[in-house]
Every structure is written in C-alpha cells, then in structure tokens.
Image: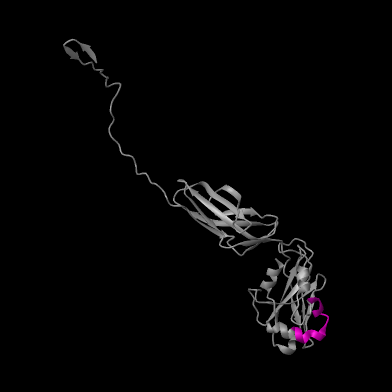
Amino acid sequence: MKKKIGFVVWAFMVIPLAIFALTGEGTSGALTMDMVDPEVTVNYPNGGEELYIGDSADVTWSATDFGLATNPIKLSYSDNNGNNYAVLDSLEANDGIYNWILPSTVCYTNLIKIFAEDNFGNIGEDVSDAVFSITYVSPAPPENVTVDLSNEIDAVISWSEVDTTIFGTPIAVDGYIVLYNETAYEDSMQCYYFLGATDSTTTTYTHYRVAEFRDQMFYKVVAYKDYRGNITKILASLTLANGYKPSQWSVDKRQSDLLFGRSIDHSEGITWSELKRRFK
C-alpha cells in the first residue's frame, strides 16, 4: 500500500492465468482401515506328539486375512512350556509348512508359536494346544512275536531281535519289555500292563502257569535303548506286592502263583503309560 496526502492509492499484483489456474474438483476412492488381526492356527505339532533328535518335522499351520503382508509368518518354539521362545524363522511365506531340523536336546515341554502380520500391522498368533516331546530315536518294534502254549500251562513269548531304529538306522538295543492284557487293544498300548523285562540278548519270556488261570492273554513286546541310563535302573527296581523283581520272574517258578495273581488283579499293576512316565 502506498500513502499520499489527501487520498489513498491501492496497488494490486496481477497474476497472469498462464502462470496459475484452478483445476476441477475430484474425489478419492474409499480408504479401508483394517483393524482385524489375521486368524492363525497351529496344526502340527499341536500337543502330545513325540519327535526325535536328529530328525526333522514339518511344522504346519493355516493363516488367513484379506491383506497379509509379503512373507508374513514368524515361527518360534519354546522348550520350557512357553516361558521363553526362540525364533525359528521371521520372514516365512504363508505356504502352511516349515521344515524344522529338531534340536539335539531331550525335552518334554515344547511348544510352537506362529505369528502372522497383515499390511496394516495387525498381528495374529496361535500356540500349540499342549506340549510335545523331543526325545531320542526309538528302536524299531520287535517283529514275529509268537506265543507257545505247547505244555498247556506256561506261555512262552518269543520275538525277533531288533537291531535298527524306527528310521532303519543301526542300533544296539539294551533290552526288551513284555506287556500283557486279557483284551487285545490293537490301536493302543496304554492299557497293557508290565509283565517283565529281558536283556538285549534274550528274545523269549515265560509267563508261568498263565494257561491254568485264563482262557486268553495278549502280549506286546517293546525294545528299548537306555540313552540316559535310567530305564534299566527303573526296571530293576520294579516289584510287585510280594517283592519279586523282574530279573527273578523268568527263573524262579516258586513265586509264579503270586506273580500271576497279583498281576491279573491289576491292583498293583503298572500300565505302559505309567511306565513311560517313569522313564522320563
């Protein structure tokens, strides 16, 4: 503004249209704000599985969201029932499978946790429903299990020697465990009761006078490898109410009546599931 005596003169700047022009109005597309976490489910291992040192396992999951990020999956595992987690992979594709080389430490309180992140930063997660085990590779199950009742009194259980693991690799087993039940549980060993044990070179076991008392009996044989040195000790310490140890059962017929009577009663019998719990 310029001042002069007696009147005022206003000065304006004229902007040529060639330099500045207004545009027509426009409307943007709708902007979607995602506040929903991805849905994640751990499929395997999800609890109760027994995995083996030196092996690998396929961790599987499902993760869904309409806007997952690129490589949105993070996998972690815990060996202390979820108190701490170690990362297995933090940028995994959502293909539902991850090949995990198992740790070299025996542990029975393992969990898998899986995270999925979408493009808006929302994160969903899931954890195994229950703990699973990582343990030593088991021997293969004994084959050709047979029962000889030729004297119509005793049952002589026989089987083939085991010299390979469940993966077919060589192994020197430490012995065999014989289980029994009056009912044939084909799909589960948990209901079978501990009868006795043998060393690695003995592939027969005698259930004395069983045919005198029962019309039928079913047997299963388990090969074991005592990696930690506790199984043999536990088996040697097992006793029935009469105090006879497994090592005596197959050589001392004088106590066969008490052995059979107490075992078949099951009041002091030890199931396979209980025996495995003690081994841990």
Q: Residue at x 28, y 34 (%)?
A: 25
Coordinates of residue 141 in the picture (x, y in percent):
72, 69
From this view, report whether residue 136 is shown above or below residue 122.
Answer: below
From this view, report whether residue 215 is shown above or below residue 235.
Answer: below
Q: Is residue 167 left or right of residue 1?
A: right
From this view, report whether residue 250 is shown above or below residue 137.
Answer: below
Coordinates of residue 109 in the picture (x, y in percent):
63, 60
- In the image, the segment drawn in magenta is 246-259
Pick the quarter of the image with the C terminus. Answer: bottom right
Q: Residue at x 68, y 69 (%)?
A: 277
Coordinates of residue 278 in the picture (x, y in percent):
70, 69
Q: Quadrant of residue 176?
A: bottom right
Coordinates of residue 128 in the picture (x, y in percent):
57, 60
Q: Is residue 250 magenta?
A: yes
Q: Is residue 156 left or right of residue 42?
A: right
Q: Is residue 203 magenta?
A: no
Q: Is residue 50 left or right of residue 235?
A: left
Q: Nearer the viewer, residue 8 or 148?
A: 8
From this view, report whether residue 182 is shown above or below residue 87.
Answer: below
Q: Nearer the viewer, residue 19 or 48?
A: 48
Q: Residue at x 75, y 73 (%)?
A: 177
Pick the quarter of the image with the N terminus. Answer: top left
Q: Is residue 263 left or right of residue 97?
A: right
In this view, the residue farthest toward the front is 5
